[in-house]
Image: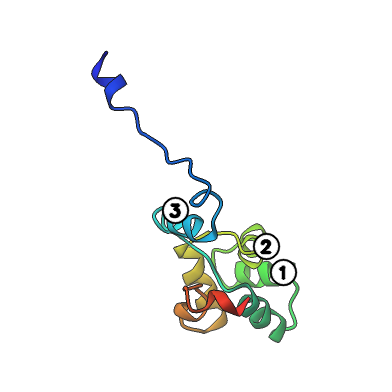
Amino acid sequence: MTSFDQQQPQFDSSPSIQGTAASAQKASASKGRVFLVTEVLKDLRTERLQSQEEMAHACSDGKFRVSIATIKRAETGRAVVYRVARELARYFGVPVRQIIKTPDKSSMQ
């Protein structure tokens, strides 16, 4: 056996770990990604009476680096890079911690 064969990673295939939201959040967090509170994002956007497309244009005009695809991704509960969370918080004028999902905020959805 070569040293490469001996170093192959072992994967845990237990059903209790696979597919859980907690493990998905941990995996994303380790890659610099965060989940945002979707209801808060939608509320902030609708308070401005903007569609996702209008918000993307306003972000572009205001030099915020957020595309419509990223807005859709964030509002549907998919992970986004932390930079996006900062940009969205800056756009809305709120603290970034207000829009990042934490274990105590996950029950809000």
Measured in 3D between alpha carbons, the distance from the residue under mark 3 to the one under mark 2, in whole angstroms, is 21 Å
State which quadrant residue 7 falls in.
top left
- Pointers 3 and 1 in contact (C-beta within 8 Å): no
* Residue 17 percent across, percent down from the top left: 48, 51
The residue that mark 1 highlights is 52
- Label pair 2/1, CB-CB below 8 angstroms: yes
Three-letter amino acid code at disc 1?
Gln
In depth, the one of 41 and 5 nearer the eye is 5
**Which numbered disc flags the more N-terminal residue, 3 or 2?**
3
**Measured Cα–Cα span from mark 2 to mark 1:** 7 Å
In the displayed structure, would residue 103 be above or below residue 27? below
Work out whether residue 92 or residue 18 is closer to the camera in this orientation and state it. Answer: 18
**Residue of label 2:** 72
In the image, which disc is placed on residue 27?
Answer: 3
Label pair 3/2, CB-CB below 8 angstroms: no
Q: Residue at the location (34% across, 28% down)? A: 8
Residue shown at 26% from the left, 15% from the top? 2
Where the N terminus falls, by quadrant?
top left
- Within the image, what quadrant is residue 48 found in? bottom right
Which residue extends farthest left? 3
Q: Residue at x 55, y 70 (%)?
A: 36
